Structure formats: structure tokens, C-alpha cells
Amino acid sequence: MIETLQGSDRIRVVAATAGRPERHRDFAEAAGIDLAANFERLLADPRIEAVILATPNTQHESQVRLAAEAGKQVFCEKPLALTRGAAERMVADAARAGIVLGVGHERRFEPTMEEVARLVGSEAFGTAMHIEANWSHDILAALDADNWRGSVEEAPAGAMTGMGVHMTDLFGSLLGPIEAVAAQSAWRVLDFPTGDVIAVLFRFASGATGQFTAVTKTPYYCRMTVFGEAMWVEARDTKHPQHGGETHLITCVAGGEPETRVLAGANSVKANLHEWADAIEGRASYRFTDAQRVGNVAVLEAVARAANSGRWETV
């Protein structure tokens, strides 16, 4: 986050902290920012107008509440929370304080995904029938088995918490609310308690269907396809767009042949942070609604239940 915002004309990072701040002293000095002893010190700093939370998931709710009570704007990494109840309390705290609650779902800001949204929302697409995606990689495979990102408490349903929530955020923004899910996890080669494969089926309130799969020990792969009655559109990454990877956008209309366009990657993390900053200052609206903030957390919670129960679970 700090490196992403270097040179930003909207956000200037002045201080940071961590659970063990002494481990980050060299980085803070190199970045030219102060290192605070704890979160409370940051909130008491009159220079600071906003906080960006890149902390373990179970800490988000209390940290958002404290920041809101201190009158600070808040940007929170994904997942916003791990339960619907926690997410509802967080958006209520933000509303009460009159702040804009940013959320780290940067995939909506990728040029390819914005074009997918335009096409799916067009009259030419027709009724949305089905959406499916697979986002897999081995970026986290080298983590220790006891790392919080692979723990049952911090990352229920395995890759759903770190990767899948990005896709279900896209799913909800494209096809509307998800009302029920079924899921299964698998343990193949990694020692993460939550498994290294997750497969999920979705039923949307509109009647559309969906599916998502993630594997956390395989070379990078990402594909999302949306099927309409008159057209389908597919986005396929060669590597993460944030790291300069190209995206292939493939479309096909009824009676036609598939057509492919190649779109360059973009810094979608910065685009998200900048739109949040613009919304705070009244220059733009922020594209996430409270219903979407809460709804995506509710989907994650339902997927975790379904992976354990083996049954369809209501969101």
C-alpha cells in the first residue's frame, strides 16, 4: 500500500504501525514515514485524516469502530469482515461517523473488468444466465502452515477468504445478490488447515447460476466468463494485472465468431484508493454500496458453512 501510494496526488502516507512495529523500522525509515508504537497512537495523531487497514481479518471490526469514533476515514482490506453481523456493525459505525468506508476489492477497477461490466449491462447482452471463474496461483504457497492467512479463524474456507471474495464481489456487482451457495474444500499438497482447493456453486436472487474454483498450489491462472442469452464475455489474465499482466477479453455474440482484444494491466489498487479519496472530498461517488459490502461478507460466511456442512446454505 505504501509503495503503491508513493507519488500520489491524493493520498500522502505519513505514519504506520503494526502488531510488532520494531520489525518494520528499516522500511519506515526508507519510506520516510513515522513508525507509531500502536494503533491508538495513530488515531491520536492530529495530522492523520484517514487510516488504511491491512491487518488480520478478525481485527477489522474493532479497528474500524475505533477509527470511526476518532473521526478518521477508513479504507479496509478484504475481506471487510468474516460474518454478516460484523459487516453490518462496521457499515453502521461508518454511517454514524459520516465517513466513507473503503474496501480493498481492486479487481472492479481493472479496465478489463470495467469493460465486462459495461457489456453485461448492455441491451445487447440480454438476460444474464450464468457466471463462472477460476482464480488460482501459488503466491501464498510458501507461507508457513501456521500463518494467519491460512488459519481457520482468520481465513475460513481457505482461498475463498484471500482470493474468492474478490470474485464474489465481481459476481455481485455484475449479476446482483447471491442467495445460496454449496461448497467443498480439498487438501492436496499444502498443510493449511483450511485446505488448498475450494469449489463453490452459487444461486442468485435473479435465478442466474454461478461457480468459482481456486487452487493455492498451481501456476498463476485467472479466468472469468459471463454468459448471456445473446452474448458471452470472458476475461483471462496471463499474470496478475497489478503486476503488468495483459488481459485477454474475448466476446462472442449469437451467430458470430469469438473476437479477442488484449488490454494492458493497470494499477487497480491505486485506482481504488484514489476513488475512495475522491469520494471523501466530494469529487466522485464510491462504487461500493453498503448492501454490497455486507452482502459479499455474507457470501463468504455462507461458503464457510457450506464447506463444513456439505449442504446448500442460505446467504
Image (spheres, rainbow, N blue to C red):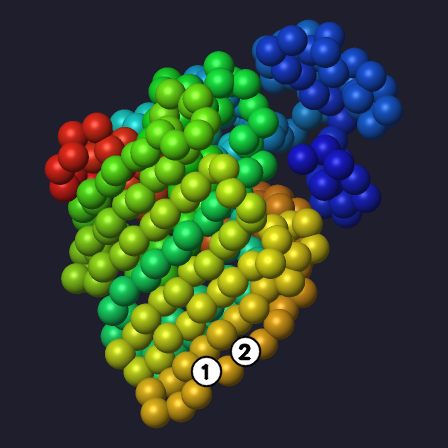
Q: Which residue is found at the position 34% from the left and 50% from the top?
A: 212
Q: Nearer the viewer, residue 182 or 16?
A: 182
Residue type indicated by callout 2? Thr
* Rendered residue at 36%/47% (across/down): 213
Quarter location, residue 90: top left
Q: Would you call the spot at circle 2 few (<14 residues within 10 Å), some (14-19), or many (20 or more)?
A: some
Q: CA distance from mark 2 to mark 1?
A: 7 Å
In percent of width and height, residue 123 lies at: 34, 82
Q: Quadrant of residue 207?
A: bottom left
Left or right of residue 28, residue 73 in this image: left
Count all numbered tags in the image, as a single digit: 2
Residue 83 picture location, percent across and down: 30, 28
Q: Could you say whether the residue bearing mark 1 is in a helix, strand or loop?
A: loop
Q: Is residue 282 shown above or below 260? A: above
Amino acid identity at mark 1: Pro
Residue where numbered disc 1 is placed: 258
Is 175 drawn above or below residue 103 in the view shown? below
The residue that mark 2 highlights is 260
Q: Nearer the viewer, residue 164 or 71?
A: 164
Along the line of sight, the residue nearer the viewer: 130 or 196: 196
Q: Are marks 2 and 1 in contact (CB under 8 Å)?
A: yes
| Residue at 55 percent of width and 38 percent of height | 138
